[in-house]
Image (tube, helix red, strand yellow):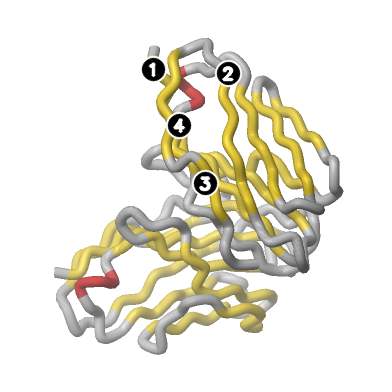
Amino acid sequence: ILNVEQSPQSLHVQEGDSTNFTCSFPSSNFYALHWYRWETAKSPEALFVMTLNGDEKKKGRISATLNTKEGYSYLYIKGSQPEDSATYLCAPGGYQKVTFGTGTKLQVIP
Amino acid sequence: DSGVTQTPKHLITATGQRVTLRCSPRSGDLSVYWYQQSLDQGLQFLIQYYNGEERAKGNILERFSAQQFPDLHSELNLSSLELGDSALYFCASSVALGGPKNIQYFGAGTRLSVL
């Protein structure tokens, strides 16, 4: 899968604010979508894997939804905290290979 | 700690040289992936090996090659290095070839500087 778009590219929010970002992808040949969190000076870490249209996943204050028919996924963070500051990558793909988006860089200001 | 080990952490070399980056996957993982992250770029997929065989190829230059050994560790060889090859190179591993739960676990990366 090519042409993965994530928006916005970067985001600054105040501590306590809720925020969301988007991953758009071609809906053909879709098999699964992964969300990764990448903190500065660390390695990307998997957050969620979603496969079915309408899937919703939640991990603490972070949740994600998936629409495979229209080709997008949303990531939500409720009550952002400084430790949420990171780049969030989506990686949609076929059975074997995923394509990483360029990410949304989130900065949470205390 | 993801369980994926990459060595070295940093590498400084000159143009025209050749270097080898090494990756040891998590115990039990059969797939190894190599990615390149250049300045202000996202993760660019280079190549995937599964149980010793090349299974997928991305935007890997002909000057670059990789292999996965019987003990499942992998090496990425970069030759005739150019300034533009300076980047962070990540290795990731996963348990399977693909599938919906095939999460990739990333190493800490090797930062290559070509001077």
Q: Secondary structure at mark 4?
A: strand
Residue at the disc numbered 3: A44
Q: For the residue marked with disc 2, what is the amino acid? A: Ser
Query: Separation of disc 3 and disc 2 at Cα?
Result: 22 Å
x and y percentages locating residue B73 in the rendered image: 55, 70
Q: Are marks 4 and 3 in contact (CB under 8 Å)?
A: no
Residue at the disc numbered 4: A106
x and y percentages locating residue A54 in the rendered image: 85, 41
| Disc number placed over residue A18 in the picture, else none | 2
Q: Does label 3 or label 2 sit earlier along the sequence?
A: 2
Q: Does label 1 or label 3 sit earlier along the sequence?
A: 3
x and y percentages locating residue B51 in the rendered image: 69, 76
Q: Is residue A45 placed above or below B76 in the rendered structure?
A: above
Q: For the residue marked with disc 4, what is the amino acid? A: Leu
Q: Are marks 2 and 1 in contact (CB under 8 Å)?
A: no
Residue at the disc numbered 1: A109
Q: Chain of mark 3?
A: A
- Residue at image point 80% right, 35% down: A56
- Residue at image point 41% right, 25% down: A12
Q: For the residue marked with disc 1, what is the amino acid? A: Ile
- Residue at image point 33% right, 53% down: B40
Q: For the residue marked with disc 3, what is the amino acid? A: Pro
x and y percentages locating residue A93 in the rendered image: 69, 62
Q: Residues within 10 Å of mark 3 (few under 14, many from 20)?
A: many
Dots 2 and 4 on the same chain: yes
Q: Secondary structure at mark 3?
A: loop
Q: Residues within 10 Å of mark 1 (few under 14, many from 20)?
A: some
Q: Chain of mark 2?
A: A
- Residue at image point 44% right, 68% down: B22
Q: Is residue B61 placed above or below B110 in the rendered structure?
A: below
